[in-house]
Image: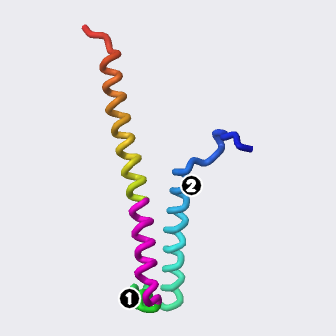
Amino acid sequence: MGKSTKNDWSASMIGWFAILIWFSASLLSQAAYIASTGMPYEADAMLDSMGSFAWIIIGIEAIAWFMIVALIGSKAVKRHIQRISESHSQESVAPQA
């Protein structure tokens, strides 16, 4: 049960699915609201209805976005460093003329 196989999903794959599900749910929610009222969500009205909890929710969402950006940025930096190290290792192995 503890063995990992190739069929297991990686954490990044699960993360991308979570982002896709979150985006799709937001889009469908907005579409349903527009279908029922004829207008899109009003951000000011939603924030006013939440009262003081609005800032807590905004903070949680800001932290989530920061984590997503940090994850993507760290992956990009790792890939860039890996490409640089691969190019240096290929240069040292190549025979000289």
Q: Which residue is drawn at 50% across and 62% down?
A: 19
Image position, residue 71 (x, y; %) = 42, 53
Identify the amino acid type marked 1: Asp
Q: Residue at x 38, y 40 (%)?
A: 79
The disc, 1 or 2, on the residue closer to the chain's N-terminal end is 2
Which segment did they paint magenta? 50-67
In magenta segment, residue 57: yes
The one of 91 and 56 positioned closer to us in this rendering: 56
- Say the numbered circle drawn on residue 44: 1
Residue denoted by label 2: 14
The answer, for residue 39, to whether it is visible in the render is: no
Residue 78: image quadrant is top left
Residue 63: image quadrant is bottom left
Identify the amino acid type marked 2: Ile
Q: Is residue 67 above or below residue 36?
A: above
* Mark 1, other Cα within 10 Å: few <14 / some 14–19 / many ≥20: few
Q: Is residue 93 above or below residue 26?
A: above
Q: Is residue 76 left or right of residue 9?
A: left
Q: Is residue 61 left or right of residue 85?
A: right
Image position, residue 39 (x, y; %) = 43, 88
In magenta segment, residue 75: no
